[in-house]
Amino acid sequence: MAYSEKLIDHYENPRNIGSLDKNSEDVGTGLVGAPACGDVMKLQIKVGADGLIEDAKFKTFGCGSAIASSSLVTEWVKGKTIDEAETIKNTDIAKHLALPPVKIHCSVLAEDAIKAAIADYRAKTKKAE
Amino acid sequence: MNVHTQIRRNDQPIYLDYQATTPMDPRVLEAMMPYFTHQFGNPHSRSHSYGWEAEEGVEKARGQVAKLIGADEKEVIFTSGATESNNLAIRGVAEFYKDRRNHIVTTVTEHKCVLDTCRHLQEQGFEVTYLPVQKNGLIDLDALRAAVTDKTVVVSVMAVNNEIGVIQPLAEIGKICREKKAFFHTDAAQAVGKIALDVEAMNIDLMSISGHKIYGPKGIGALYVRRKPRVRLVPLIVGGGQERGFRSGTLPTPLCVGLGEAAEIALKEMDGEAKRLAKLQARLLKGLQDRLPEIFVNGDLEHRIPGNLNISFAYVEGESLMMGIKNLAVSSGSACTSASLEPSYVLRALGVEEELAHTSLRIGLGRFTTEHEVDTAVEELVRHVKKLREMSPLWEMAQEGIDIKSIEWAAH
């Protein structure tokens, strides 16, 4: 299968690998997928006092497309408000990386990961209020 | 002749996929060449020397193939490959004996062409028993004995599995089949030339052979069909009645000659090659085990051809690993390499959990594999498995002592 240059670049030089403190109040964590299905993504966002996402980290178990999709979205969400980040669509990810049809589910998973991280952050801030 | 230096161009990845196919041995190519050019005759032409020379080449090849498996040359027929041989053997006997017997026994880890042939026969009213395999990939002989009835026409069990390289107990299977008067067919595509095979000692009635798995050409294979006691088949391809009427069509002389030469080389070099490959296999496995925790060999390590290793690298998905090890040509049991998105049915049949099946690689070693290539493979694999584990959330959880089975994962 021939992959796009952008995809290969994200696979070979993944951006923002790592973990943030999942217990911290300003960190939202999303963990999506399933080991049995062959892909699991963990995406974390750190939201600053100004409401902007100041950091994002990921770890992914999955094929090259899954790794590239999650790497890409960590770049995209940084500097955005959580409302803006929530509007990222899987179709944008798939288009940017030129995912082949059998790999579209990787972009869907990446979108789910952002949504899950945002939901986790919101649940935490609501509790704190 | 130093054949080890002639196969790979420097810009090509290291070839470690010998169960998929093998490069042709240069000696095989050399034997074939004259039959592409001046000895081009139709081996079935009886009226001139062109035909006679071609026939001589074909008949010599038939003898070479027969010798490798302990058969008589009259019992070997040429086909287009192991897929055709498997189709012809199973459909052929099932069709011929259908008035008396309508039951077939096979295993769940057979090659797709055997399973699909059986499925077709099921649609036509035959009954098929698919034997499970044990955790090590081998069948349970008691289960086989219980499955074979007086209605069983053929038992089809592969000699060596294409994904995990395990060797089935052929002699014991043959004995059971003979006692129960069922024919024993074995798909030996991955076994011929790798392990000693003897159709007499093992009571094998039908055996499928492939050319390109034994350093011969693609597009040629053979089927061994026992003459005493005689096995009868309904042909798939009819016409001029060549190959004892089992397989019509003009024989491809150069390909037959190539298969014969490959068989002769295999017979001559099998023992030495097996020892050399066993050393390489051990070196590869030790190199990985010394430096990587939590890797698992799929399938029995003892009852296995030395040219195969199938390993699960826990917490690292197979396709992403293959993308990393660009300098190595291997294959994966992961779903993501196929359109089906299901992990290997062979690994699943062994009871390998889906999450581990997704992390497996099949590494095939062969005649042209060098120690240096194995060492390079170890380096590449260790480097990339470590890198990918560093970015694996599952590896992180395992390091934190979280049991990934305790988490409720959402299926998607």
Image (cartoon, coloured by chain):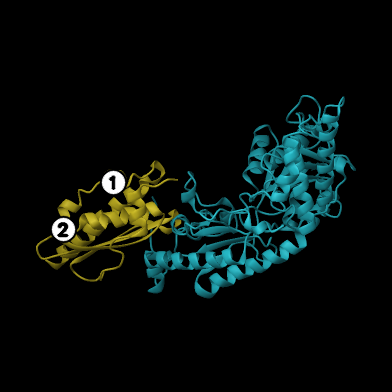
Q: Nearer the viewer, residue B235 or B81?
A: B81
- Residue B33: percent from the left, percent from the top? 72, 40
Q: Secondary structure at mark 1?
A: helix
Q: Quadrant of residue B366?
A: bottom right
Most distant residue in the left direction: A50
User: Is residue B354 rendered to the left or right of residue B168?
Assistant: left
Residue B89 appears in the rendering: no
Q: Nearer the viewer, residue B7 or B379?
A: B7
Q: Nearer the viewer, residue B312 or B4?
A: B4
- Looking at the rendered structure, whether the residues under marks 1 and 2 are on a common chain is answered as yes
User: Is residue B363 rendered to the left or right of residue A19?
Assistant: right
- Residue A30: percent from the left, percent from the top? 28, 60
| Residue at x 79% of width, y 32% of height | B246
Q: Which chain is cyan?
A: B
Q: Residues within 10 Å of mark 1 (few under 14, many from 20)?
A: some
| Chain A visual colour | yellow
Q: Quadrant of the N terminus of chain B?
A: bottom right
Q: Which numbered marker is on residue A96?
A: 1
Q: Chain of mark 1?
A: A
| Residue at x 37% of width, y 65% of height | B391
Q: Nearer the viewer, mark 1 or mark 2?
A: 1
What amino acid does circle 1 point to? His
| Residue at x 90% of width, y 43% of height | B228
- Residue B371: percent from the left, percent from the top? 61, 67
Q: Secondary structure at mark 2?
A: loop
Q: Quadrant of residue B168?
A: bottom right
User: Is B126 situated above or below B175?
Assistant: above
What amino acid does circle 2 point to? Gly
